[in-house]
Image (cartoon, rainbow, N blue to C red):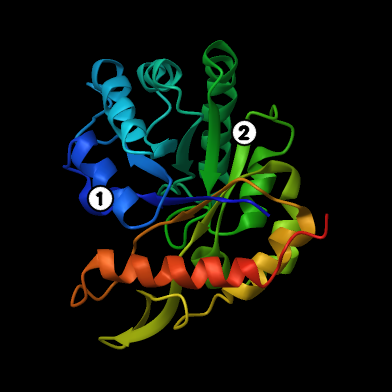
Amino acid sequence: MTYLWSVFTKPWLALPGDELGRLVSGLGFAGAEVPVREAAYVSPATAEAELPKFTAQLRAEGVEPISVASDLSERVFAACAEAGVPMIRIMAELGPDGYAASVRRTRMLLETAAVLTERYGVQVGVQPHHGRFVASTLGVLQLLDGLPEQFKLVWDAAHDALAGDHPAVTLELGAERLGIVNLKNVQYLRTDGVWKPYFVQADEGLSDWSAVFAALQKVKYSGPICLTGQYSDPAVPVEERLEKDLHAAVTSAAQHPSRE
């Protein structure tokens, strides 16, 4: 399969587009997910003015924007449409009123956003996330059930493992909705008497990336693969870790070539 090897640029969220593009392409990536958040170089308030210029600078360095991590406001949809960014990625947050009420609230948000996906031609990707979010791939698929095809699953290797699932199951069930595949890895570390997620290199965690690529080959996925650059130990530079993990991912993918 041919994948667009991408990276979530959150570790460098304050860099302007030209510097970021050179850094990302220098690490070996051809795609990027860009945070459009309050602390980032491009914020939701400035997105309509700044995102088209920012993405043009990325493309000038050979880096294609695959998505933004942001909110579902109309100004972000409009900015993505103008900049040619195909997707807005979000997570389904759980509030103090409990799981069922939170899911209903998020579903209403997505149904409202359906008008904007149609108006601007921009997709919405929902990612499972351990903790105070809808945590499983199957939970996200249930949340998206019945929504238009513009609503996609952003599958995540680490959070799938934290949910106790397996890629052979969840990627097959989510194949028709699959928009982006996130790669990172995780283990549990006991800290102050509590087991907490600890994000690690490709070969150190609960997720078997070889099994991920075997499942992707089976469902004939050929979209973006996004390494998220999330590591809990800051002792090693994130750039060094990402280069190592990109090599591991490309090697795993090569072991599962297309049957076509």
Residue marked by disc 2: 151
| Residue 188 in which image quadrant | bottom left
Q: Is 55 left, or right, of 49 in this rendering? A: right
As measured in the structure, the alpha-carbon distance from the residue carrying label 2 to the one carrying label 1 is 31 Å
Q: Position of residue 21 (x, y in %)?
A: 28, 41
Q: Is 233 left, or right, of 136 in this rendering? A: left
- Nearest to the observer: residue 190 or residue 58: 58
Residue marked by disc 1: 23
- Nearest to the observer: residue 170 or residue 164: 170
Image quarter (top left, top right, bottom left or bottom right) of the N terminus: bottom right
Amino acid identity at mark 2: Phe
Picture mark count: 2
At 53% from the left edge and 22% from the top edge, which residue is drawn?
A: 113
At 16% from the left edge and 42% from the top edge, which residue is drawn?
A: 14
**Location of residue 200 with respect to 129 vertically, above or below:** below
Amino acid identity at mark 1: Leu
Work out which residue is located at the far right of the displayed protein and give it.
Answer: 260
At 73% from the left edge and 60% from the top edge, which residue is drawn?
A: 217
On the question of residue 150 being in view, the answer is yes
Image quarter (top left, top right, bottom left or bottom right) of the C terminus: bottom right
On the question of residue 231 being in view, the answer is no
Q: Position of residue 120 (x, y in %)?
A: 52, 14
Circle number at residue 210? none
Q: Is 143 left, or right, of 49 in this rendering? A: right
Crowd around label 1: few <14 · some 14–19 · many ≥20 (10 Å)? some
At 56% from the left edge and 42% from the top edge, which residue is drawn?
A: 103
Instruction: Tell me the element at label 2.
Output: strand
**Location of residue 163 with respect to 52 vertically, above or below:** below
| Nearest-to-viewer mark from 2 and 1 | 1
Q: Earlier in the sequence, mark 2 or mark 1?
A: 1
